[in-house]
Image (cartoon, coloured by chain):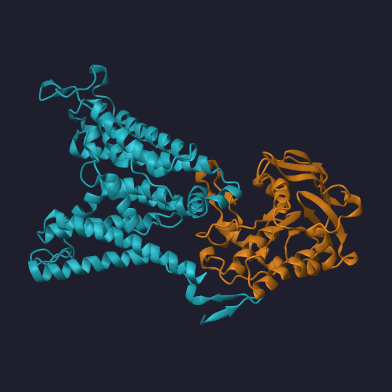
Amino acid sequence: MSDTSEGTGGLTFDKSKRQWPNELNVFGALILIIIIFEILGAIFMQQSLLFDTRDRFDSIFNEARLRIIIIQVAIIGIIAIGVTQVIITAGIDLSSGSVVGATAMIAMSFAQVSIVNGAENPKAIFGPAFLDLPVIVPVLVGLGVGMIAGTINGILVAYSRIPPFIATLGMMLFARGVAQWWSLGNPVSFPTEAYAVIGAGMNPVIIFLALAVIFHLVMNYTVYGKHTYAIGSNEAAARMSGINVPRHLLLVYIIAGMLAGLAAVILTSKNLTAQSGMGLSYELEAIAMAVIGGVSLFGGRGSIIGTVIGALIIGVITSGFTFLRLGAFYQEMVLGAIIVGAVALDQWQQKRAAARA
Amino acid sequence: MSDIILETKGLTKHYGGVHALEDADFILNRGEHVAIMGDNGAGKSTFVRQITGVEQRTRGTVIFDGEEVNFAGPLDAREAGIETVFQTLALADDLNVPDNLFLGREKTMWNFLGPFRRLNYKAMREDTMAGLVKTGVKIPNIKNTIANMSGGQRQCVAIARTATFASKLTIMDEPTAALGVQETAQVENIIRTLKEQGESLILVSHNMRQVFDLVDRIIVFRRGRICANLRKEETDGEDVVAYITGAKTGAEFEGAA
């Protein structure tokens, strides 16, 4: 107990307990991982991962690679924004990947054109009345499907008190079934031009970052955010303080579902097709982003900023392995180790905090 | 305005076949500090839970501040002006001091945004500081999360809620049970401050020394019933123990337990 200051009542306060934002640790990890790849790149590839070392360009960064790093994590990152909120309430959402699959199929069916290369659209799911619809229709359908899935998850978790793991595991299987049943396994293709714009170019990144900013503000400056942290931190205290815990949990799961639905819309728009296997294991990657970003699976701690940095860490590792021409299997091994490491670190910090108190 | 802040008549709570509380008639005057004592399972906490709306009573009436009340939940009771410091601290560890004080009744702006209305951090911080000053609690950095505080500081935060919300009645359920000597002294000082400010208080405690130090009157519970109502000046520790263990029963409670 060094460096203490006295309160009037004789209570002491240890200045060394001052809090260091966890996001800085995560950011430090990101920088560390980049440095490792830069060193490995310099040794084995005689190239830099992120910096532009070619003579004929005077840009500092290798912009193409930076773009790839963020594009490949943007869509799952959108899901991770919702998953982060669920995990902060001490819940979990295993269904988001399958909800992406189901939403992709259903939303895409409302985004199809009638004429492809002068002939009728061979992949049309519905009759002519449902072709060439304005772009708002498939977008709303996508958000709606995600919302329904989130509502069911939320009701199961909040009102029937089924553990989130089981409730969303059920939804994971159910939604994947819906995705396969929808067109009996056939892909749904040929969207309208307006629909194809949504996921084109850097749009997924812009949407991801915009949502990250919005939900960062929501989590830090609104009653919704405060109650989300309170429920994950001490559900009994939240209830005793008069927070309507079930209603709040329902809202959190609905938001997570809608973000998964939106991710499906962007994904199908980017790929110009929907397949029933879309979004496979996205839920795990989204959870990984959150966990690497410092969101505690025990609830109450974590942030959207952390998750965004977590997403970037995954993006850098994925790109870094490709850059080093190492197989994808190494990348999965390393990611697995990092996720376990992140949770172990969280556990250790929890224990240390408990020991000090 | 009558002098009575809280009155219960025939307050009863049954959990199935277990009669946890039977016909409790209780009166608390404005500005009075009353202790509730009794053995484990005597009905002290049950009594508190019925008043604060944490549980719904089986029968009986509760009159608070001159009006009969039926609180649907603890928030109702808090809004009416009853602040409770629970035995298990109702604090969220990952939130800081103002967040905890205002949990469930945040000061907000932009209220048209519904659940996404904006928190008025500045107003909450100022009210928190005022509340801490009023109770004499000093927590050097109120932006610290509860997880980084000692047991005493946590208890002080819980008690500071009382002052922040200008409550009419404070109920403390064993506020010092888990605290060290120095921290207990700190909490007791806060209770004295509340007394000087004319705050009404119900203190549930096992600590005889503390009770005789702090309160005006002692109510003893035994097997779900009130068995004694003693003015502090007219009793002593031995006497109270006799009531708690059942060796004695107050004259007016004869046949009750």
Task: Specify the quadrant of the image occupied by residue B87.
Answer: bottom right
| Relative side of A101 to B232, left or right | left
Q: Nearer the viewer, residue A136 or B200?
A: B200
Q: Residue furthest bottom?
A: A2
Q: Residue at x 22, y 38 (%)?
A: A278
Q: Nearer the viewer, residue A329 or A123?
A: A329
Could you tell me residue B250's position as x and y percent? Answer: 88, 55
Colour seen for chain A: cyan
Could you tell me residue B247's position as x and y percent? Answer: 83, 59
- In the displayed structure, would residue B28 be above or below residue A27? above
Q: Residue at x 87, y 52 (%)?
A: B3
Q: Residue at x 58, y 60 (%)?
A: B98
Question: Is residue B113 visible to us here?
Answer: no
Task: Specify the quadrant of the image occupied by residue A169.
Answer: top left
Q: Nearer the viewer, residue A186 or A66?
A: A186
| Relative side of A213 to B42, left or right | left
| Relative side of A197 to B251, left or right | left
Question: Is residue A95 visible to us here?
Answer: yes
Image label count: 0
Could you tell me residue A220's position as x and y percent? Answer: 47, 54
Q: Residue at x 36, y 66 (%)?
A: A24
Could you tell me residue A86's position as x and y percent? Answer: 41, 47
Q: Nearer the viewer, residue A75 or B248?
A: B248
Colour seen for chain B: orange
